[in-house]
Amino acid sequence: MNQLDKIKENLNKISIKAKSDIKAISETNNLHFLKSKYFGKKSSFNEILKSLNSFDQQAKSEVGKLVNEFKSEIMTLINEKILKIEAKVLEEQLKQNQVDLTLPGTDLAIGYRNPLFLIIDKITTIFKDLGYQIISGTEVDNEEYNFNRLNLPKNHPARAMQDTFYLDNSSDEKNKFLLRTHCTNMTARILSATNGKVINPLAYISLGNVYRKDDDDATHSHQFMQVDAFLVAKNISFANLKWTLNYFCQQLFGAKSKIRLRPSYFPFTEPSAEVDVSCPLCFTRGCSLCKYTGWIEILGSGMIHPNVFQACGIEDETINGFAFGVGIERIAMIKYSIDDIRLFYNNDLRFLKQF
C-alpha cells in the first residue's frame, strides 16, 4: 500500500469516527469542541495537510480534493446537528412557557380628559374665533391688582381675611401677596400696561385657578377654575355685551339657548347684570335641573366701571368696555348634569371615562 492509499484509508477512519462522535453528542458546546478536535492544529486532519508537501503535483491535487470533501462533509454534519439541538432546546422552552391563546386579554386602563378641560377647550375655541387672546396670568398677586384697581374699597367684604388666602401680613398693599380671588386681576394688569393709551381693541380671555376661603361641599370649593373675559375699545356698548353673551351661550349649550339679564352689582362693572341661561334640559319648561324655574344662573357681567379705567391710568372718556366672568365648574355641572363639584377632583376613572 503506497502513501496515497494510506492517506485515503486514514481519512476514511477519521470520517467514520467523526460521524460516530457527532451522532452521540447532544449539546452544542461539545460540537464546538469536536470542531477543534478534528480540524485544530494538533488534529490528525492537520497532520495530513502538512504531509502534502512530500507529494508531487498530481498527488497533491488528488489528496487535496479528498481532504476538502472530508472537511466539507464533517462540517456540514456538525452544523446540521447544532441547528437540530438548538431547535429542540427552543421547542422545550416553548412547551414550558406555553401561552393559552384562549384566555381573555387584559384591558389596559387608559386616561380620560377631565370634563373641566373639555369645557376650557370649548370656551377658548369660541373666543378665539371672535379674535380674543387667551392668557392664564398669575395665581399669586397683590392687593393692588386683585382689589384696588378693580374698584374694591378697603371695607369691601371680599377683602376680609375669611374670604381671601393671604400669603403674608404686610401692611403695604402693593406688596401684600395673596392667592387671587378671581381672574379679573389680569384685567387690571393688562389695562395698567397700556400706559393710558388704548390704540387697538383689547380683547382677552383670562382663565385659571382662583382661591377663596369656602368650606368644601357639593357646590363649593376653596379652589376652583374661572374664565374672565373683557373687551375694551372705543364706542363699546351694552348691546355688544349682550350679543357676545348670547353667542357664547348658544355655542356652549346649543343654538336654541336663550339668555336673560337681571340687574345686579359688582364693584368693577356699572351697570352690572346677572346672566341666566335657558335650561339645556327642559328649555324653560321646568325640571329638576333648573329647580322648575326654566332658567339657570350662569355668570356675572357688566360694563367696566369708570373707576377701574381711572385706577389703571386710562383717562380717555371715549374708551369703554365690557367684562364678564364664569366658573368652569359651574358650566360643567350644568352641561353634564353633575350635582357634586367634588367629582371633578377625585380622579375616579368611573366618573372620568364617561367623558
Image: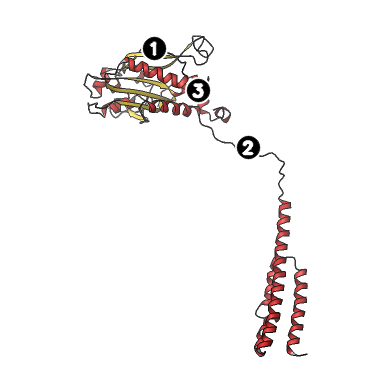
Residue wearing tag 1: 261
Question: Observer-nearest residue: 19 or 108?
Answer: 19
Give the image quarter of residue 12: bottom right
Question: Of label 1 and label 2, which has the lower sequence position?
Answer: 2
- Is the Cβ of the residue at disc 2 closer than 8 Å to that at disc 3? no
Question: Of label 2 and label 3, which has the lower sequence position?
Answer: 2
Q: What separation in Å lies between label 1 and label 3 (alpha carbons)?
A: 25 Å
Q: Position of residue 343 (x, y in %)?
A: 53, 25
Disc 2 crowd rating (10 Å Cα; few below 14, some 14-19, many 20+) is few
Q: Residue at x 70, y 57 (%)?
A: 90
Q: Position of residue 159 (x, y in %)?
A: 34, 20
Disc 3 crowd rating (10 Å Cα; few below 14, some 14-19, many 20+) is some
Q: Position of residue 238 (x, y in %)?
A: 32, 15
Please indicate whether residue 55 sits to the left or right of residue 152 in the image.
Answer: right
Residue wearing tag 3: 341
Question: Of label 1 and label 3, which has the lower sequence position?
Answer: 1
Give the image quarter of residue 251: top left
Q: Quadrant of the C terminus?
A: top right
Q: What separation in Å lies between label 2 and label 3 (alpha carbons)?
A: 29 Å
Please tell me whether residue 345 is drawn above or below residue 66 in the rendered image.
Answer: above
Q: Quadrant of the N terminus?
A: bottom right
Disc 1 crowd rating (10 Å Cα; few below 14, some 14-19, many 20+) is some
Q: Comparing marks 2 and 3, which lies closer to the viewer?
A: 2
Q: Amino acid at mark 2?
A: Asp
Q: Residue at x 60, y 38 (%)?
A: 108
Q: Residue at x 50, y 29 (%)?
A: 114
Q: Under tag 3, what secondary structure?
A: helix
Give the image quarter of residue 207: top left
Residue wearing tag 2: 107
Q: Comparing marks 1 and 3, which lies closer to the viewer?
A: 1
Q: Residue at x 33, y 17 (%)?
A: 240
Question: Observer-nearest residue: 70 or 111?
Answer: 70
